[in-house]
Amino acid sequence: MPHLKIRGIEKNLIVENSKEIIDGLTEIIGCDRTWFTIEHQNTEYIFDGKIVDGYTFVEVYWFARDKKIKKDTADFLTKLIKRINNNKDCCIIFFTLTGDNYCDNGEFF
């Protein structure tokens, strides 16, 4: 934990930069790198009857962090994603999880 779900970007770009993503977030968040998961989601954006280019979205699922860590995480991910994705628009969405709704191998946090 944290879990990242990324869409609107080619999978190979995420794979090639996954170490940099986790290294940077480990430093910002201060947790063990083995706690992270990154998931790529294939997505097609549709508008007016056509497949179109769309935003890159990064969903961050995590337990609550303070405002500075959240801002630093958003800034880091936005800068990195825009750099590797030819400066396309990027949106970071945070989902705060609670221990009573997060069960890992039968154990709640």
Image: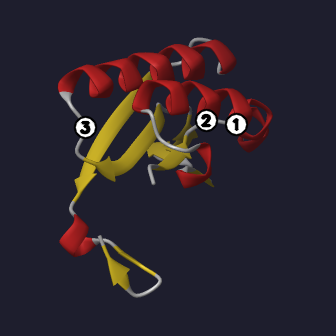
Alpha carbon distance from label 1 to label 3:
22 Å
For residue 108, side relative to residue 58 (left or right): left
In the picture of the structure, the residue carrying the numbered disc 1 is: 18
What amino acid type is highlighted by mark number 2?
Ile
Q: Amino acid at mark 1?
A: Ser
Mark 1 vs mark 3, foreground winner is 3
**Callout 2–callout 1 Cβ contact below 8 Å:** yes
Q: Is residue 48 something one can see in this rendering?
A: no
Identify the secondary structure beneath mark 3.
loop
Label 3 neighbour load within 10 Å: few <14, some 14-19, many 20+: few
Q: Give the colouring mode of the picture.
A: secondary structure
As measured in the structure, the alpha-carbon distance from the residue carrying label 2 to the one carrying label 1 is 6 Å
In this rendered view, identify the residue nearer to me: 1 or 14. 1
**Which residue is under mark 3?**
65
Circle number at residue 22: 2
Badge 3 amino acid: Arg
Q: In the rendered image, which quarter is residue 88 located in?
A: top right
- SS at circle 1: helix
Point out the image quarter for the N terminus: bottom left
At a point 31% along the width and 71% down the height, the residue shown is: 102
Q: Give the camera-side residue of 74 and 53.
A: 74
Mark sitting earlier along the chain (1/3): 1
Query: Residue 99 at what x, y percent from top left?
Result: 24, 67
